[in-house]
Amino acid sequence: MTVRRFHAEVGTAFATAGLGIAAVTGAAGLGFGWEESGPQPGYFPFYVGLILIGASLWNLMRAFMKHRAAVLHERNSGEIEEPFLGRENLGRIGMFLAAMAGFVIGTLTLGVYVASTVYIAWSAWRQGGYRLWVALAIGAGFTIVQYVIFEVIFKIPLLKGPIEPLLGIY
Amino acid sequence: MGNLDLLMHGFGVAITPMHLMLMVGGVLMGLVVGVLPGLGAPNGVSLLIPLTFALDPTSAIILLSSMYWGALFGGSTTSILFNIPGEPSSVATTFDGYPMARKGESTRALTLAFMSAGVGALIGVIVITLLAGWASNFALQFGAPEYFAVYFLAFAAFIGMGSASPAKTLVSLTTGLLLSTVGMDTVTGEIRLTFGLDQLLSGISFLVVVIGLFGIGELLSTVQEGLRFRGVGSKIDLRDVLRTIAELPRYWATTIRSGLIGIWMGITPGGPTAASFMSYGIARQASRKGEAFGTGRPEGIVAPETADHSAGSCAMLPMLALGVPSSATAAVMMGGLMIWGLTPGPMLFATKPDFVWGLIASMYVSNLIGVILVLATVPMFAALLRIPFAIIGPMIVVICFVGAYTVSSASFDLWLVLLFGLVGYLFTKLGYPLAPLVLAMVLGHKAENAFHQSMILSNGSLEIFFSNTLVTSIMLIALALLILPKTLQLGSRLRRKAPVE
């Protein structure tokens, strides 16, 4: 599967327009007119939202125009436009994103210390090609440094899960 | 008191053992942040802000600004040694810096870059020193309409003068403005645009957004390119350093020209990135003889570096005097100022002279420290890039998420970082600029309040923005910046097309 630049442009334009529509409807609920004391709370977001929708539509139009030119060029010269994201790139990014999302979910359930040890060790092991125990040592070492910097030096508590209390860390 | 006396007083504030230590620490951290992909100056500063709550504001700003200088130096290091710009503003340094390093003259390239960066920063700080008193007196005449006009000017300059398509800049800007309105409205006390999500009641922190956009976004681009670092040897030979320093005066014309470009782009919201590209382009046009640019020509390093740093330091002036930052990093620092309970603007000069002049004096000292430290430690920091990405990448991810969490200890922010990471990646790939979004998020509240107050003053008539000479001239400059650059471009493009067809 590949993603073309055209698809990415159109998707982004729709997303930003959607944000604008959400802001306009939300602001309309608050009132965007005038009252005795001045503009109502929705005044500013309402008009900013309208500008955002306008700019998004402009980008959408530009994307279609560019796409038509690219298709014509392709037909005439036989050159195929370079994909925005090739299969290989998409795989790499997907893998990285999935691991990152896994880290976030892990942080929220098991705490940041367990999650970061596992996440760093996993990438070093699977992607870096290190032996499992070396990878685990890298992950654990990083986590210990993190603990010392945040909890010991700056006294900022980070998210903890069910495991830390068992080790006597609060 | 004249500016010079105030500056001397500032040196008294800045040069204490504690502050010198913070400068060294800040510059070193900045170097790490500048060298590593995914950690740049804006999000490095964002990550550090929650850790500065324990310091007094003067020490905190010295630490943050030193980190910024360090990040600028670090960005140039990787541009030259690895052909990877560590910062967007050092992209132009790769054009001639990397070829020169490939020819085996890496010490010369690095020294040229660092020395001209130092000179650029010095030019910038001198301008700040000379203009600070004047700028703050000028800004004292400002009322709500003038402030709104200045914010409008900043937004207009981004749209008109930015290199991205105007509609894309506008999308980025308005998205930032809308994000800043989420949560409790400070004027009316109304809850806005939370769409029933309790987590959004207190608003969306711009620090979290910056960490996502710049940190995770940049990492995703790095991963997608699957880039391998091909480094050049990075040993520093002291004799080469001295020889290169002796060579520097030869490029005086380039240096002065680039310094001026940097000053202009730093004070108006063009920012360091635009300054370095512009300066490189003009240096190339101005050169007459010698080897071609792009093959390791010294002017090709001197020009972008001088402009980059002089713009970077000049960006602090409008941030302090008007409360209008002209680069993403200055915007983040200004957000920090507001978190520490300071209000950037002309009153800051009157009420907190220690803070303002301590910062300005520290800029002289920490840039000097920066040049020396960076020359001494380059081989060490270059080694950081030899760590495989499979290890350093996830570590940067963890640092970003943990940093975002420490902003307000909210788990919801972790999802926001992930979301804005994707947004940052897509926006960068599609040519949407990120700096306007950050600027709009930081300025959103202030712009809306100024607009609100002006409307109350005028009973809802927009004429108030053209009611006196001061506000009218600011508005006219803003409109000119908004419309003229792109119109002129269009005009010259049409003229160039005509003879061909």
Image (cartoon, helix red, strand yellow):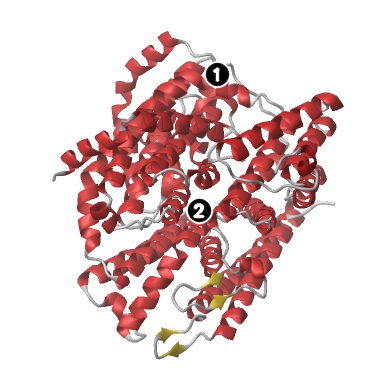
In the picture as drawn, the residue positioned furthest to the bottom comes out as: A36
Mark 2 Cα within 10 Å, few/some/many (few <14, many 20+)? many
Please indicate whether residue B148 sits to the left or right of residue B165 in the image. left
| Amino acid tagged 1 | Pro
Residue A121 placement (x, y as % from top left): 79, 33
Q: How many marks?
A: 2
Is residue B248 in sight in this rendering? yes
Please state the chain letter of the residue tagged with numbered disc 2 in the rendered image: B
Please state the chain letter of the residue tagged with numbered disc 1 in the rendered image: B
Task: Locate residue B400: give its quadrant.
Answer: top right
Residue B160 placement (x, y as % from top left): 43, 60
Q: Which numbered circle lies on residue B326? A: none
Identity of the residue drawn at 32% across and 30% down: B16
Residue B164 placement (x, y as % from top left): 52, 55
Is residue B118 in sight in this rendering? no
Q: Nearer the viewer, mark 2 or mark 1?
A: 1
Above or below residue B209? Residue B474 is below
Lower position in the chain sequence, tag 2 or tag 1: 1
Q: Which numbered circle lies on residue B435? A: 2
Identity of the residue drawn at 53% across and 26% down: B80
In the picture as drawn, the residue positioned furthest to the left comes out as: B1
| Amino acid tagged 2 | Ala
Rounded to the nearest angstrom, the CA distance separating label 2 from label 1 is 31 Å
Q: Secondary structure at mark 1?
A: helix
Q: Identify the image quadrant of the N terminus of chain B.
A: top left
Q: Which residue is mark 1?
A: B379
Q: Secondary structure at mark 2?
A: helix
Please indicate whether residue A138 sits to the left or right of residue B462 in the image. right
Above or below residue B390? Residue A74 is below
Residue A6 placement (x, y as % from top left): 71, 59
